[in-house]
Image (cartoon, rainbow, N blue to C red):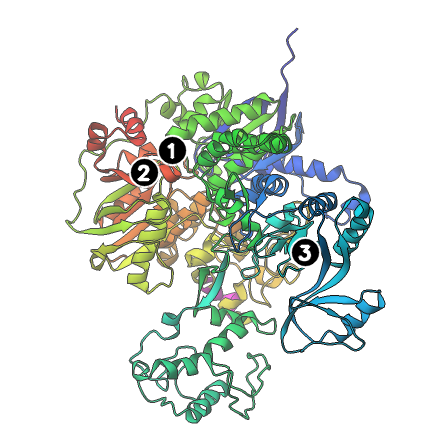
Amino acid sequence: MNKQKEYISVIGAREHNLKNFDITIPKNELVVFTGVSGSGKSSLAFDTLYNEGQRRYMESFSAYARQFMGDMERPDVDQITGLSPVIAIEQKTTNKNPRSTVGTVTELYDFLRLLYARIGKAYSYNTGKPMVQFSEAEIIQNIATEFKDKKINLLAPVVRGRKGHYRELFEEIRKKGFVKARVDGEIIELRPKFQVDRYKIHDIEVVVDRIPVNAAMKIRLGESVSQCLKMGKDLLFVLEEGKTKAVQYSKQLMCETTGLSYEEPSPNSFSFNSPYGACPNCKGLGNVYAINMDLLIPDKSFSIKEGGVTPLGEEREASVYNQVKQFARKHKISLDKAINELSKEQLDLILFGDKNISSNLDLDLNDENIPDTYTGSYEGIVPMLKRWFTSSQSTDVLKAWVEQFMELNTCPTCEGARLRKESLWFKVNEKNIAFLNDMHLDDLQDWFKKLPAKLDKKDSQIASGILKEIDDRISFLMNVGLSYLSLSRPSKSLSGGESQRIRLATQIGSQLQGITYILDEPSIGLHQRDNQRLITALKQLRDIGNTVLVVEHDKDIMMAADYLVDIGPRAGIHGGHIVAQGTPQEIIKLKSDTALYLAGKKKIEIPSERRKGNGQIISIKGATGNTLQKVNCDFPLGTFTVVTGVSGSGKSTLINETLYPILSQYCYHSKTKPMPYVKVAGIENIDKVIEIDQSPIGRTPRSNPATYCGFFTDIRTLFASVPEAKIRGYQAGRFSFNVKNGRCEVCEGGGMRVIEMNFLPDVYVHCEKCGGKRYNRETLEIRYKGKSISDVLNMTVEEACEFFQAVPFIYRKLKVLLEVGLGYITLGQSAVTLSGGEAQRVKLATELGKKDTGKTFYILDEPTTGLHFQDIQLLIGVLNRLVDRGNTVLVIEHNMDVIKVADHIIDLGPEGGSGGGLIQFAGTPEEMIKKSKTHTAKYLALEMK
């Protein structure tokens, strides 16, 4: 008997721009919501279905628990039935914690730690030899065998390599009934009040027993060994009569040659988030701040008096400067000489001080920003800056000021491994945990597949369960196209798409059933080659008994869906309708824009000719950052260039981490260091570089497009010029929600109140006082053309363009937002609600609103994120306009619609991770499909048919 099909039923959906529609969504299927940007896809998926699921979960708590959480607003919908527990997997919740890595987020590193704690073999960091470890029974048996029929002294070490006279210790030993001790290699009798030289380093062992080793003494030997181990903290020495060198035995891991011992390993011994495993120098972060001498002294032709030492500044009446003057006078160092004329010793004295000599400086420190811990001796500029940077007494302002003279370097103690020395000397199959942590996932999977054959029977039995968990988790990550990542990769460096696919893999691994999963464009950052893997992963999530709802524009995923919902027909107020719904095969027979694109009846046209550029190039030679393999690359200026390649092939390393920092240093003297390269040429041919990425335009509800783009200042000035505002004496500041008087003081101009959920993401609800309007009643009484400042902030860009058409300096900036496809967002829309793609287009619009020089180099990373086919056409038009003005636009992109319209393609590969990092092709799209056999060429040929 066939199981009856189940549905999620939504009746009267009106959230945001949704037009009061009803929809039934099949459960336990892969359902894709599509439509132009701003049509209402996210309003249905996240703001209606997910929010209702979250609200119902909250209501399952007791009334007592709910009083601490506050009320969650119900979405604007009449009824939702059939909704199972909801989990949202979004793009924008990347963890910025520097301690968070791919390994910790996926819990893979937890299993690695467990593996090393259980079967890791310890080696001495002094000799590199394996450590030894005995049980008490093994120690007794070894002594009985090795020293049979010999007379021995059993020694318990109580002092190892420490200074002191130890008079009290010797008295305590005597009171316990022991009459002899071995002090610095010599056995002596303990007399009353015996002591040793307090200024010398000593080794002291108690002679616990002097015993012949034979069968008759077996019981006594066992008792003495037990007492020895107790006094010596699991360590004892055996000294044969007449010999001078003792043999060591330990219940702990121990180096037989040097006596070095390690504690018994636990999973925490390999955690960089635990004091038991973290490197003591960098505290488990892998990098440390250090003073950069080039930032401290940028120009050595200046004297110290002229401000040659930047933090010291020019000569003036200041406590620190007075210290330097007095110290320099005492050491006969001229502050008038150019710094490059001072000897190294003189400069070092000024910078690092002289700890051996007190300057006896009698100074009154009255600077309230400087912690009052001055002792009277000159400590030096560098130690002083370090102290200010690390001191808990320093203000945030002071720390930020010092940070400008510092750089973040790899920790010299652990070399970036984050772990303490002992932890790095435990090995499995001759590799330490840091080595595995740095491997790309595809290589790591191969390593683990070969591991069982290398383990002995006992270790194999212990590790079998751990290895299965590790293999499953790696496979899930591989299946969503993340084979190029390493476990040590910091979470904060992941793109929105990568972090979302990691969470997707984690959810597949959890094997939950009966869940409604909602995903936001999981294909972001994926090459066409990896799309099939992602589709398989989504279907796997569906097949274990879940409903999978995906907001997506990718053609492959749309065609692979069980059910497709097209929302539109346009953005904002012109959207919010169900245009079409059904299977992909049913949809492509219809006449909607989505259907026409899917059927191939509507497409982005290939340009009739490609630009050759202005004849100038920027050339990079020998780039070797991350996985780049001595890459030489030319970037033609005056063109629309697209950088392609499978995920992890090195695109971001070459462009975002090498090219952009080089150009930024040239144009703006940026401090960001580029990845290693040998040579660059042609940078004099540009005068401006602009990187437009997908990072948020702000991190709080206060930030919005109006403030970011700069036209909110103009709007406030306009409201301040209204006659009523002038009568009341209101200035432009009155209409700022960041300033007292004009704003609502309950929410302090935020319009929202944050409810901390502790174990869940924070929830924002409207302020009860102002109803989310941000301003107080008096401010809202001022109106321009019948609208209050709050009404204006709630307008969409499209509505505002019409409203401000007669105000050129505001209209011009609004029109650019409209041109990049953002007519549907509101002027005051909170930055935290903008997707990565929307944030990027807000930034693009801001740059388009500025005057360019015709020699500007624009860099964009996947600008088609979140864009429907129709929006992509709009974006391509905007980017072409920039190039037509003489500028250069360089885009990292996977979307074939963008790649096929490029003037120049640079394709990296052939694979991701260690299998990539090479330039596979450079030239026009036509040349690529003729000459190249790369993954990109294969899919581009299909697109250009």
Identify whether 717 is placed above or below 211: below
**Amino acid type, residue under disc 3 in the picture:** Glu
**Amino acid type, residue under disc 2 in the picture:** Thr
Q: Earlier in the sequence, mark 2 or mark 3?
A: 3
Dot 2 corresponds to which residue?
644
Place residue 514 in its image quadrant: top right
Q: Which residues are magenta?
A: 717-727
Q: Earlier in the sequence, mark 1 or mark 3?
A: 3
Dot 1 corresponds to which residue?
527
Classify 10 Å Cα crowding around label 2: few (below 14), some (14-19), many (20 and above): many
| Overall secondary structure of the magenta section | helix
Q: Are marks 1 and 2 in contact (CB under 8 Å)?
A: yes
For the residues labelled 1 and 2, the Cα–Cα distance comes to: 9 Å
Please state which of residues 377 and 869 is positioned toward the viewer in this rendering: 377
Residue 721 lies in the magenta-colored region: yes
**Amino acid type, residue under disc 1 in the picture:** His
**Residue at image coords 32%, 33%:** 897
- Residue 890 is situated, as x and y percent measured from the top left of the image, at 29, 46
| Screen quadrant of the N terminus | top right
- Residue 315 is situated, as x and y percent measured from the top left of the image, at 40, 88
> Seen in the image, is 395 located left or right of residue 808?
right
| Circle nearer the viewer, 2 or 3 | 3
Looking at the image, can residue 587 be seen?
yes
Please state which of residues 74 and 400 is positioned toward the viewer in this rendering: 400
Q: Assign a secondary structure to mark 3.
A: strand
Name the disc covering residue 240, or none. Answer: 3
